[in-house]
Image (tube, rainbow, N blue to C red):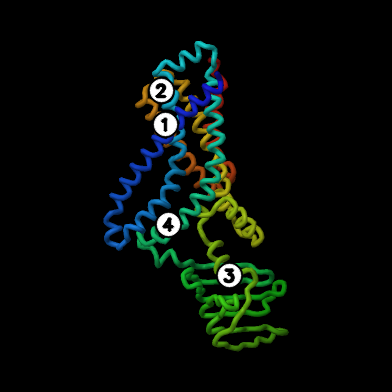
Amino acid sequence: MNKILDKYIIKKFIINFLFIIISFIVIFLIVDIIDNLDKFISRNISSKEIIKYYFFTIPWFVSISLPMTLLMSTIITFISLQKNNELTALKASGISIRRISSSLIFVGLLFCLISFIFDNIVVVNATEKKSPIEKKLKNKTKITSKKSNIYYHIENAFLGIKRFNYKTNTGFQVSIQSYNGSDINSRIDAQKMTWDNDTKLWKLINVDIRNWEKGNLKYHFLNDTLINIKDINPAIIKRDNIDPEDMNYWEISYFIDKLKNKGLNYTRWLVNKYFKTAFAFTPIIMILFGIALSIRKPRSNFSTGIGFGIAVIFLYYLGIKMGQTLGYNQVLPPFLSVWFVNILFLSFGSYIFIKTRT
């Protein structure tokens, strides 16, 4: 009986889930295509690029709409059980709400794992692949292909790059300062640096070299020279200077370690690292909260259920964004800034669920 019941409820839930998520995707595509139609035409974006753009945008949209989809699926599943008097029949046969809900709680835990993997592998890779088309769509190619003010601490030296072009792997206004303790040994200034794929070295162009030896300054100029900068290549520069929102959990963790070693502030990245795990727990929170709402409003209709779902999601996302902002500005500790809303919603949902006796 219990296995049959679990399969029936899970099947009902999955059908509702698929219907809602597909409906959301279709509505999103229609609205977004209409909104961007003039840009597609004016910027000569081909039909192939448009298809590719939306193919790689859908994973991001599924990710951000997952909490609402799960919450609404849970509410609608329980409401349909009530409307068909199935819930009354199950309770009359001695099966409690807790037992009826257990299958959905299991589904919620499973979705937590799926969400973490999906967000950190599928969404991150899809975002990277759609990026060139998105830049073209937003007409930001010239801006986003360059990065300004890049700094590295390499053993006893500092590397500074005023501007770096990712397309050509070229840095401009480059400065390398070497130190012996607190004393400067040498300084190299170059008009630009380019990556040599053959030698795997940096080629400095229009180079001024200053050396301090026993208090005496020696200066000389070179048209160009090849130099090895330890652990620094175009791929490293690109990876180290992308936004934390575009990194996966493991990339952020690696980058935080690098910032720690450099003695630099890593608060923003730590907030985003904790957000990756906090958001992955959203499925179980939304399902548990959906069950709690259904229990509190046993005679709700579909319209009321959807209304409650929208209100809850609005408050949840508002809380998440406020928490991130407070975390970025160090008003709240990074962990608490992104987990506070989860803890609040989970506590309320768990309290209602535990208090249920029938």
Which residue does the numbered mark 1 point to in the structure image? 16
Task: Select label 4 or label 1 by which is in front.
Answer: 1
Pick the front one: 6 or 64: 6
**Which element type, helix, strand or loop, lies under badge 4?**
helix
User: Is 39 drawn above or below residue 13 in the view shown?
Assistant: below
On the image, the x and y values in percent for residue 175 come to 57, 76
Does 348 sit left or right of 131 as displayed?
right
Pick the front one: 39 or 121: 121
Task: Select label 4 or label 3 by which is in front.
Answer: 4
Which residue does the numbered mark 3 point to in the structure image? 233
- Upstream in the sequence, badge 2 or badge 1? 1
Quadrant of the rendered image containing residue 50? bottom left
On the image, the x and y values in percent for residue 21 come to 41, 38
Q: CA distance from mark 4 to mark 3?
A: 24 Å
Q: Disc 4, disc 3: CB below 8 Å?
A: no
Task: Select label 3 or label 2 by which is in front.
Answer: 2
- Upstream in the sequence, badge 4 or badge 3? 4
Q: Disc 2, disc 4: CB below 8 Å?
A: no
